Amino acid sequence: MAKTTKKSGLIAHGIVAQNKKGRFNYTILETIEAGIVLKGPEVKSLRSGRATITEAHAGERNGEIWLFNSYIPEYQGGVLSRFDTRAPRKLLFHARQVDRLLGEVARDGITLVPLDIHFNDRGIAKVTIGIGEGRKKADKRHAIAERDWQRDKARLMRNKGKEF
């Protein structure tokens, strides 16, 4: 999935952090890729694959969209500059996208869910933001049952092929 360089073990491009809980707790209606404003040591820490966004959320501040409560640990490579590991980080959208997203969030039950942080083919850090609608408990149970059925079906098909 994520490609690493041989010498350093750093992620060249691929997924750095995922929010599987976000996909379970919300029905994702649409996804949008956004840039993220980072400092140098934060990028180095992301390249080492050490980030967490399971408790993160995106929201509006001063007419811009920010990523709150994401955890990027300090880089341990001897860098002198320190940064706040849970600081809000600005997301980079076009002005039209910001207006549209803020209009979506104004609707009842719609929220912006960070789904993953990844590096694109050019090596630039990006965040995938999902426009999500909260699931009810029954919907979550249905999703679990569907996932279990897909797993059992794949197992049955795999075993059936071995019998013949």
Image (spheres, grey):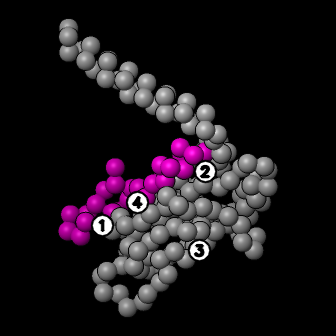
Residue 160 covered by magenta stretch: no
Q: Secondary structure at mark 4?
A: strand
Element at label 3: loop
Whole-angstrom CA distance, mark 2 to mark 3, is 18 Å
Q: What's the residue type where badge 4 is placed?
A: Val
> Over which residues does the magenta segment extend?
1-26
* Front tag of 3 and 4: 3
Q: Could you say where residue 151 lies in the image, as x and y percent from the top left?
A: 38, 28
The answer to whether mark 2 and mark 4 are in CB contact below 8 A is no
Question: How far is disc 1 from disc 3 in space, using C-alphas?
Answer: 24 Å
Task: Give whichever of discs 4 and 1 has the lower sequence position.
Answer: 1
Which residue position holds label 1? 10
Label 4 to label 1, Cα distance in Å?
10 Å
Q: Residue at x 49, y 53 (%)?
A: 19
Q: Relative to 163, does residue 46 appear above or below in the rendering?
A: below
How many labels were placed on the picture?
A: 4
Please state which amino acid type lies under the numbered disc 1: Leu
* Circle nearer the N terminus (1, 3): 1
* Location of residue 157 (image quadrant): top left
Q: Which mark is residue 19?
A: none
| Rendered position, 26 above or below 44 | above
> Looking at this view, is 99 or 20 the one in front?
20
Inspect the image, locate mark 3, and give the three-letter code of the amino acid beneath it. Pro
In the displayed structure, would residue 141 be above or below residue 12?
A: above
Q: Is residue 56 left or right of residue 100?
A: left
Say which residue label 4 marks. Answer: 16
Q: Which residue is mark 2?
A: 130
- The residue beneath circle 3 is 88
Residue at (37, 67) in percent of width and height: 50
Binning the other alpha carbons within 10 Å of mark 3 as few (below 14), some (14 to 19) or many (20 upward) gives: some
